[in-house]
Image: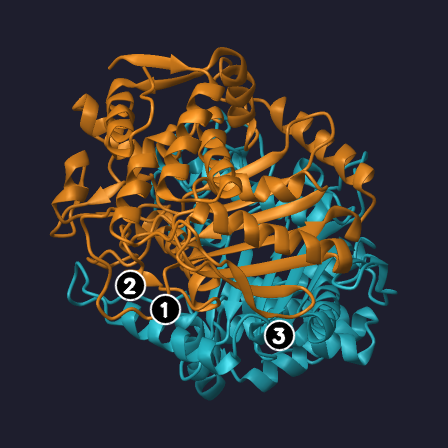
Chain colours: A orange, B cyan
Amino acid sequence: MTFHTFSEEQLRTFTEAVFLKMGCPVADAQLAADVLLRSDLRGIDSHGVARLSGYVRLWEKERINANPNIRVVHETATTATVDGDLGLGLVVAPFAMKVAIEKAKTYGSGWVAVKNSNHFGIAGYHALMAVEQDMVGISMTNASPLVAPTYANERLLGTNPMCYAFPAGNYPPVVVDMATAAAANGKLEIAQRSGTSIPEGWVQDAAGNSSIDPHQLKQGGSLLPLGSDKDHGSHKGYGLGATVDILSAVLSGANYGPWVPPFVAFLEPSKDPVGEGLGHFVGAMRVDGFRPAEEFKNHLDNWISRFKSAKTVDPDKRVIIPGEPEAAAEAERKLKGIPLIDVVVKDLNELAVKMGIQPLS
Amino acid sequence: MTFHTFSEEQLRTFTEAVFLKMGCPVADAQLAADVLLRSDLRGIDSHGVARLSGYVRLWEKERINANPNIRVVHETATTATVDGDLGLGLVVAPFAMKVAIEKAKTYGSGWVAVKNSNHFGIAGYHALMAVEQDMVGISMTNASPLVAPTYANERLLGTNPMCYAFPAGNYPPVVVDMATAAAANGKLEIAQRSGTSIPEGWVQDAAGNSSIDPHQLKQGGSLLPLGSDKDHGSHKGYGLGATVDILSAVLSGANYGPWVPPFVAFLEPSKDPVGEGLGHFVGAMRVDGFRPAEEFKNHLDNWISRFKSAKTVDPDKRVIIPGEPEAAAEAERKLKGIPLIDVVVKDLNELAVKMGIQPLS
């Protein structure tokens, strides 16, 4: 596996050019590129520019609308439903979070369910928009069905990530951003490429047997919920995935469960949809709606210090604060650039040819 | 193990009498008894009347105030912080949820962080208060430190449950009510009593090694987060436990992490508290703040039907909807009574002698 390193600016210019060629308005192209770049900067390589050609293929199939009329279709003082008009989730979700933040500024909190959207990138991006306003940020999305609930031999839920983000004082924000499956698909792809096996408890094969073969998911198997099996609490991971699905889609009017449209363009969406597109749910709460923001941040710093200095099993390891590795990656990659594996570079350069823009290298 | 079965009314009368003897006002005694009874009715035996003598021991140590001045100390239109005045969490949390529900009636949503409280029983009770108003209910609490975060060899988090509850149409509400540890303490106690081993991944011993001995927790070991180990996503269970801790305590001004006061009266609280008592976080969102309630309920019924009828690995099992077993237990136990194991009956009858009330039998 060979890496090529690009500056943030190189990848940003390239990504914006692709979205512009799709017909996105300039502001939308910039925003969508920012969401993808933030993922690469934060070290979440699976959700960044590596997915760009996937979004383009959905657009080619007219399953993404490059110029959507994103709008609030139902609301109260602190709640709203947004219709994404089949736009890029990368643009729809920030719109929804802005609505939530504006409501929170006036009323203390804001909560927005989104229908008729597409995949929104990393959940952390949207939650961090609230953190910048000294708010608690919450974001989640449903996704293409890949996960079998406890006892099931069917893919009924996506990896349905949930994110909670909190502003700290001297430390980076605490960002809990997690798939509700035991392991996300990206980890399987790494094992597939390197030809290694995976731990028990990540996937079951088409017959429903636990498997350590990373290829089983593509051969009719399923991912398993966080907890892996009933003894270890897989009903909890399933319950969290269900929560994300209900808040994102049953509440908004999007498709849920097995009806969620697949991210890959070669799989067709359901012929009998139960809603529109896929769904997100975002929220923002002003910290000073509960206590003065400085007090909160001082105590969160104290929380972080205490956990970072905890006694560990292995003296060479220490307790990691949620969001800490991503903040460290962001600082480093802003300076040193973003490494992409050769297959991603090849994919992006083929995309450049298709879209008629400058290749990366 | 012998069971004795009591009617709901018998146990309710007994429990109210105990709280009255503690000096609780009548309404508080009734409410606290209702929370404990609901737990027993719903089959969550570990959190019901089995804990009654534990609350009394905390009251004897003046760590529970039977006649508290529970009040809102900070608020915006949709957020508030409640000071529980060291009252029973069984009374403080319903107070907080009522505040949240009232805010939601006016503004669409309401969110309340609570400090200076005690253990609040089952999270589901409080979340279901919102469901009865056609709202989404959310409740969580931090708790005595028993769980070691990923890599740690210290108990820094409680089993910190989170609950999300949703009103359905023809089906019982969907109630995701889960500890963020791989297994809650109650399961260890069952294994201790029956002399059996526990699965790998529930606890580590005092040296930080994985153990299948259920007694290790009492001998200096720790519970493990949902996910059990890093490979299986224990950092996610730890992240969820951290989220509960931050929302419940850093946001409200309660104690967090290792400073949370222990539930057992024989362990002293920290001499250097970082806040007041323990903390909860509750919320309510009107379903019709997002879409008409009937639409939501119809789609949630469809969600439930689809999941219930999923293809399973074992044809003798089916996918369980979160909250379904508890609703079934509640229906049955209301008719047939509540079975208590003999050690609990003995404990309650000793309590009756101490408090000078009628024993159970």
How many residues crowd mark 3 within 10 Å: few (<14), some (14–19), many (20+)? many
Q: For mark 2, what is the residue?
A: A259
How many residues crowd mark 1 within 10 Å: few (<14), some (14–19), many (20+)? some
**Is B20 left, or right, of B47 in this rendering?**
right
Q: For mark 3, what is the residue?
A: B129
- Secondary structure found at label 3: helix
**Is B68 left, or right, of A213 in this rendering?**
right
Q: Are marks 1 and 3 on the same chain?
A: no
Q: In the image, residue B162 lies at what x, y percent? A: 55, 55
**Is A50 left, or right, of A252 in this rendering?**
left
The residue shown at (24%, 46%) is: A264
Cα distance between the residues tagged 2 and 1: 8 Å
Q: Are marks 2 and 1 in contact (CB under 8 Å)?
A: yes
Q: Are marks 3 and 2 in contact (CB under 8 Å)?
A: no
Q: In the image, residue A15 lies at what x, y percent? A: 41, 31
- Secondary structure found at label 1: loop
Q: In the image, residue A121 lies at what x, y percent? A: 43, 41
Instruction: Say which amino acid is labelled 3.
Output: Met
Which chain does the residue under circle 1 lie in? A
Cα distance between the residues tagged 1 and 3: 28 Å
- Secondary structure found at label 2: helix
Which chain does the residue under circle 2 lie in? A
Question: In the picture, residue B17 is in which quadrant?
Answer: bottom right
Closer-to-camera residue (A252/A69): A69
The residue shown at (40%, 49%) is: A66
Q: Are marks 2 and 1 on the same chain?
A: yes
Question: In the picture, residue B288 is in which quadrant?
Answer: bottom right
Q: Is residue A319 above or below residue A26?
A: above
Numbered tag placed on residue A275 in the rendering: 1
